[in-house]
Amino acid sequence: MSQVGQVTARALLRRLAVEQAECRVPSLTAAIVRDGRTVWFGGRGRVGDGPPTPATQYRLGSITKSIVAVAVMRLRDEGRLALTDPLERHVPGTAAGQATVAQLLSHTSGLTAEPPTDWWERTPGLELPDLLKRVGPDQVRHRPGRLFHYSNVGFALLGELVARLRGTDWQQAVRQEVLAPLEMNATTARPRAPHATGYAVHPWADTVLTEPEHDAVAMGPAGQLWSTPHDLARWAAFVGGDTGGVLSPDTLAEMREPAGVADGDSWTVGYGLGLQLARVGGRRLAGHTGSMPGFLATVWADPAERVGVLFMANTTSGMTGTLTTDLLDILDEHEPRLPEEWQPAPADPDLLALTGLWHWGPKPYALRLLPDRGLSLAPVDGSGRASRFVAQDDGTWLGLDGYYAGETLRVAADHLDLNTFVFTREPYDPAAPVPGGVTGWHA
């Protein structure tokens, strides 16, 4: 399956082998996706009588949440719900009824992390009515929207939301709408052969303990699914932008936007809408980690580089936490991506005349022309508000990102109007309609 060079493949396999040996993992698989295709797969350890393969199933754990989140976003795109809807509108009678759909997706609903049951990951699951009886007002730990607080219970409720609006159970909904279109046919709610057995490894001896596996029932949307490296590689490509028509690229990009962060001002770990986010070594990654008794898994995608990485293992704990990013580093070191060749492109003369220097008061900005009549407006010195804009049918431009995301840029003969701010060719050009007037520069 390897489409990287032999030297690269050897370096990747060695990193995987070190992880498996030093962390004492019964079996470990990993894969790298580039431009939507799996370019490397590696497996170490044993599953039954042989090594793990791309077809070996492992439990996904919380990666399940991202798949359920896609089903929710499809409902939004169809107009069946709004992200600002309170849960009560669609699933009445829950303690989290005032939390919005977006807050549940982003773990900002304030709900408790775990259900008030026995250790739910190691015991047979409860039906939803029984679970809801146990999740009372005292299970709301924080005011909705106040802060990021990871909640498995919140995704149980989102699974029920999908089920009620689709008229089926959440498993069937994600099978029909997400997994089947992406040809993730080996992703199932319960294990099927060939699958790895989940183990805990003794901390002070080289022995293992078999972990239990149950149907989580109502808690299933939080971590029920099983999958294979082959299928999870397709998921990595999806998160990176190869949506296969399941979602629009704009909706997927919305899911990758930070809705909550874990460490304040300069965030490195955050959460979007059903997707975990991380900034590591200059990369902006989206994906999810997964953990259930006996299993660990992680999938990350870097949309900017069109690359994804994953691992799947049958151990409860003990891995380094850097395997996936180390594999990306090795790929970059041995086979860095070449930049796309630059080629000249035609430009509308009227738009070309707009390019160049503009001023927000005394601050110089550069306006550049982008493909498809897009514009980029950014401070010349690199500090301050910068945004890209996409052309609209009415002759205006809509902000795509940065401070002016969602705001409108209008072009007049002698100035730019950006959501009431006036940009002029000269600093505070007296010929332009600058609010407050211009008295002239003086000593």
Image (tube, rainbow, N blue to C red):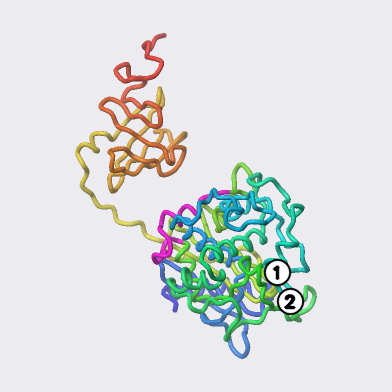
- The residue lying furthest to the top in this view is 443
Instruction: Say whether residue 329 is visible.
Output: no
Q: At x 59% / y 76%, what residue is drawn?
A: 189
Q: SS at mark 1?
A: loop
Image position, residue 440 (x, y; %): 36, 11
In this figure, which residue is indicated by the disc labeled 2?
Answer: 201
What is the tally of numbered marks visible in this picture? 2
Q: Nearer the viewer, residue 293 or 99?
A: 99
Quarter of the rendering containing residue 277: bottom right
Image position, residue 415 (x, y; %): 31, 26
Calculate the distance from the C-alpha at mark 2 to the C-alpha at mark 1.
8 Å
Q: Which mark is residue 412?
A: none
Q: Are marks 2 and 1 in contact (CB under 8 Å)?
A: yes
Image position, residue 306 (x, y; %): 42, 61
Kindly identify the amino acid type of the residue bearing the numbered disc 2: Val
Kindly identify the amino acid type of the residue bearing the numbered disc 1: Gly
Quarter of the rendering containing residue 442: top left
Does residue 80 sit above or below 418 in this rendering? below
Instruction: Say whether residue 117 is visible.
Output: yes
Q: SS at mark 2?
A: strand
Image position, residue 238 (x, y; %): 45, 65
- Mark 2 neighbour class, 10 Å CA radius: few under 14, some 14 to 19, many 20 or more: many
Q: At x 38% / y 32%, what residue is drawn?
A: 418
Which comes before the other along the chain, label 2 or label 1?
2
- The residue lying furthest to the right in this view is 204
Q: In the image, 262: left or right of 359?
A: right
Q: At x 59% / y 60%, what residue is drawn?
A: 158
Q: In the image, 415: left or right of 128?
A: left
Q: The magenta stretch spans which residues?
A: 240-259
Q: Is residue 253 magenta?
A: yes
**Magenta stretch: dominant secondary structure:** loop
Q: Nearer the viewer, residue 273 or 163?
A: 163
